[in-house]
Amino acid sequence: MTLLRLAWRNVLRHRRRALLLSLVVGYVTLAVLFMLGFLDGYGESLVESYARYVEAPVVVAPKAWWQDPDPQSGFKAPFRVDHPGVLAQTPRLALPVLLRSPYKAHGAEALGVDPGGERALSRVPSKVAEGRFLAGPGEVVLGYRLAERLDVRLGERLVVETGRKALGLRVVGILRAGVSNVDFAGVYLHLEDARSLTGVWATHLALEAPRGQEEALAQELNRRLPPGLEARGIWSLMGPIRADYEASRLFYLPLLGLFLFLAAIAVASTAYVSVRERLREFAVAESLGLAPWRLAGQVALEAALASGLGLAAGLLGGYALLWYTATHDVFGPLMRLSAELLPEAGLAEHLYTAVRPGYALVAALVVGLSALLALLFPGRLLLRMEVSAYLKEV
């Protein structure tokens, strides 16, 4: 307690130095929190986009279709998954088509869906900006960017060709989902129309699963499904997008190392200057019976107090920043620009940071480890101090 009181008094005596150390530690803490929240929020945004707009939480399909996504490799007869973990399911039929409006033609990947079943798994039906979603055969719904490319408007006719057969469909809805795969390439037609174009029942089954249990459910289904069928969770469905996200997480280590280095430099320089300026003071204290290790402990306590103040301020500021960016669409313009430049990436137009209590532990470990490493040098200076040399000058 005596050392703690002395350390606190010395912190107050050297306020400018302590303030500088606290600011650097606070900045490092805030940066660590924001980095963790941003990367986790980015990952959640990708998963949400793919699970609710592009794919499904879990997809079951014939292995032949996974290897070659030709409609003829899909289900030839009706199939249903019976498992208590499956909350909802609906068949889908994916097929490559050529879209012809009165003015332009465009190749696309169309998706035949059951309107009722689709509403239970997908958010696409709720993103119709003009008109309505599918109600029956003879209708088609398009992403607004694709409709612009085709120069087609609500109520106009659109020819859908597969190379073997064609259908004339009426545009009944224009989508604005805020997800590039839907807005730039979304083509949704009734499942009965897709079946008449291909002659197959469905290419795959889309399954709803409890959030966070998609991969576990897919693995369990693979142990129960008949031979020739395979279930995949949303992480497996994301393909190269998942690889890009996991690669971005590798920046954790070098960035954490950089933050640790910055904090260590701040602690080491502050503690070293403090020790150098007070060597006579420490020599007198040691001559009066205070052990060198206690002097080193006092310096460590001073650095710990100043760092603790910076850590507390950084945690408050960091979590306040994360809360704000988790509830306000701060990164919306950046995501919308990314969706425009990379429409094939499946990015959402919104990104909100994640807020988790565990981030505080990571930040505290970075600051604590950097402080321990930084105090080795000034501590060594105290332990090797020649008392007699400084007492002669007193």
Image (cartoon, rainbow, N blue to C red):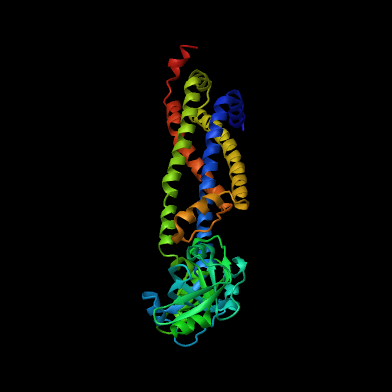
The front one of 298 and 207 is 207
Asked if 102 appears above or below 240 in the picture, the reply is below
The front one of 335 and 360 is 335
In the image, is 1 to the left or to the right of 46? right
Residue sitting at the far top:
393
Q: Residue at x 50, y 77 (%)?
A: 112
Residue 286 picture location, percent across and down = 50, 22
Residue 170 picture location, percent across and down = 55, 75
Residue 192 picture location, percent across and down = 52, 83
The front one of 27 and 237 is 237
Residue sitting at the far front:
102
Which quadrant of the figure contains the N terminus?
top right
Q: Is residue 201 visible?
A: no
Q: Is residue 62 visible?
A: yes
How many marks on residues?
Answer: 0
Residue 259 picture location, percent across and down = 47, 41
The front one of 142 and 333 is 142
Asked if 360 appears above or below 8 in the picture, the reply is below
